[in-house]
Amino acid sequence: LKSLGYRVLEVGNPSSMEELFESIRQLSRPLHKEREAEQVIASMKGRLATVQSRARALPHRLKTYIEIDTPFWTIGGHDFLTEALTYAGVDNLFADLTRPSAQVSPEVIVERNPELILSFDLKKHEISRRAGWSAIQAVQRGWVLDDVNRDALSRPSPALVDGIEALERQ
């Protein structure tokens, strides 16, 4: 596009919520919409604070395996979604990974024993039928969420808050 004379603004994938807010600001500058961007950011922060205050009332935070793709692809600790999910009382089971995403072994998932599973692709019955997964707390309790809004949760945009709020309602 640059070679055709178009102005190009490249915005990297954020690894935190603050980086996501900064990317919104970055996009607003060439459009001269800084004020509107700050309003969007303030709304996002306010809505997330509301979710977070309700999550504080939960008995404990849920250790959660987030399967973003098959087989066994998850997010690590350096991804905006890891931080965003904490607002809803969810702790990423693989937050200790230094990469934004990684393929992990099913044995390690079973060993870490998540209390909740978020699946972006597979249905609950497909997750539950995996070999050895009947020993996982989330599977035993039926706490496998397969109807999450993948687009809202996986894209660094204002719609992320919609996805977090929808997750909290489940």
Image (tube, rainbow, N blue to C red):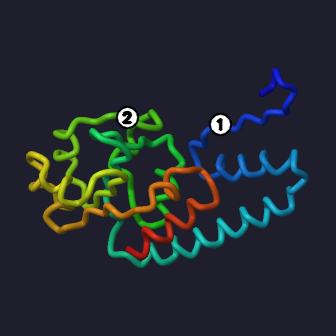
Q: Point out residue 93 in the picture as x, y percentages from the top left corner.
A: 33, 49
> Of the residues under marks 1 and 2, which one precedes in the sequence?
1
Q: Is residue 39 left or right of residue 134?
A: right
Q: Which residue of the protein is positioned furthest toward the front in this rendering?
A: 4
Residue 60 lies, with reference to residue 8, above or below; the image says below
Seen at 35% across and 44% down, the residue is 94
Can you tell which mark lies on residue 12? 1
Q: Point out residue 20 in the picture as x, y percentages from the top left corner.
A: 65, 50
Q: Is residue 13 left or right of residue 9?
A: left
Q: Which residue is mark 2?
A: 102
Q: Amino acid at mark 1?
A: Gly
Seen at 19% across and 40% down, the residue is 106
Q: Which residue of the protein is positioned furthest toward the right in this rendering?
A: 32
- In the rendered image, which quarter contains the N terminus? top right
Closer to us: 165 or 59? 165
Closer to us: 123 or 91? 123
- In the rendered image, which quarter contains the C terminus? bottom left
Label 2: state its secondary structure: strand
